[in-house]
Amino acid sequence: MFKLFLCFTAALIAVKASGDFVVLHSPNSVLFSGNEEVEQSLLKEVLAAGLGFTVKLRGIWSGISITDPFSLPEAVVAIVIEGVDSIDVPRGKRFPLNVNEVEETTWQALRERLEERDNNNTLVRISLGDGLDALGQSALGELKPTPIDETSLRALNLRKEEDRKFLEEVQLLHAIAKKAPSAIKPDSKSDIYWLVISGLRPIFDTYGSNSTTSREALSLLNNAMNVINDAFIQTYDGQVMVVAFTNDASKVHHIRSVTLERQKRESSDLAPNATEGVETPLEAKRFNNTMFSNDNNNAIKQNEQDENTNIEGEEESDTGVNNTNKSNSDTNNSSANSETHDDSGINESGQELTNMEHTKNYNTQSVGQEIQGLAKTYTNNYPVVFNIFLWFGVVFVFSLLAICIAISQMDPGRDSIIYRMTSNRMKKDN
């Protein structure tokens, strides 16, 4: 058992996908601190919280804090590097990332979160690996990358397909940075720009992650990311979050396959426990006869109270099967072999009933455990109504206070209504 536990732990550590989540820029109203690991499935909550959206899963990650809710970012720029575990970025705040889903799933979830509130947001996803011909007229307008200067390359070679595709993606990043200040007009609505880079992985596979070519490719990518960062900071006057993270889809699929295999093993382990002790036909016959004893009847009655109509229907169907088998045996006057066959059929029916009861009780316990501790759900109008009542109450209290102070300092002269109404008799000017 201990060896099995060690093997399971080693396999779990081996398949755990690791990555990097780097915050290149964030305004002073959103602070990132600490070094806590964050799961990629929670990035949509982190980025949505930075834009001022209500977080649906509270207490998920302590690395982000909102210091000024009235000066939140207007946009999020996410740079996704596919196929690699980590990147060497000299600037920004780095956090370990547990890659548990593909990047497109994260993008779809974040886009749906913004579309729930407003359909007029600028939501742009550009896969740079498609090339300039596939992109055509992008959401940022026509992109015109500058030609690559082959003399500036030391190890990369334009005549090799992997190198050429990666360099085209880098040039597209520079073209986007050049186009952003003139094509984007910031407004009060939240925007997302999702840029996917897929050409770095073939470089690592061809030359190795520690080769001179790979280091030159990382240097060019870091330079392009810095240009993107500066361009969007200038476009949004600093009110923008620029992040980058790695994503290796192959490891995500491996984790899912291991998880499914473990769930199948757990479900297969439950079946032998329900029929434990039934090995030979003679023992099965004895088990079938003793299953309807007084002690087991009490247990069956208790299960009937929990399951009500479903268990009663199953018992009636089981009784019908038993009566049919008995009548067939009386009519045909079968031999001892046929009686043994009937007993085996009854035993199989009893085993199926026991297995179904065990599975239903197990599922009922699991559902009960999941239901416990659920928080109260609120509609999307809750924060709106809350803010209306809050600020109306604040304005009403201060207005009432100002009126009281003004009345208390009023001079009760002849021209004042206070002088006229508090006198013994009404006074009038002659």
Image: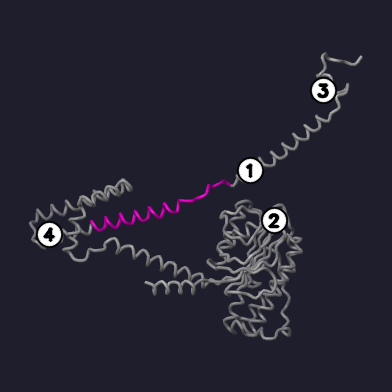
Q: Earlier along the polypeptide chain: callout 4 or callout 3?
A: 4
The answer to whether the residues at label 1 and label 3 have Cβ atoms under 8 Å apart is no
What residue appears at the point 41 percent right and 51 percent down from the top-left corner?
Answer: 368
Q: CA distance from mark 4 to mark 3?
A: 110 Å
Count how many numbered circles sit on residues in the image. Answer: 4
Q: What stretch of residues is rendered in magenta?
A: 350-379
Q: Earlier in the sequence, mark 2 or mark 4?
A: 2
Residue occupied by mark 3: 418
Amino acid at the residue labelled 4: Glu
Q: Which residue is mark 1?
A: 386
Residue 118 sits above or below residue 411 on the image: below
Quadrant of the image containing the N terminus: bottom left
What is the x, y in percent for residue 61? Answer: 59, 60
Residue behind mark 4: 339
* Above or below for 246 versus 425: below
Instruction: Give the Cα distance between marks 1 and 4.
Output: 74 Å
Q: Of callouts 1 and 4, which one flags the residue occurring earlier in the amino acid sequence? A: 4
Gap in Å between the C-alphas at discs 2 and 4? 80 Å
Percent position of residue 342, x then y: 15, 58
Q: Is residue 366 magenta?
A: yes
Q: Earlier in the sequence, mark 2 or mark 1?
A: 2
Query: Could you tell me which residue is drawn at 61 percent across and 82 percent down?
Result: 161
What residue lies at 57% left-to-right and 74% top-to-bottom? 83
Q: Which residue is mark 2?
A: 67
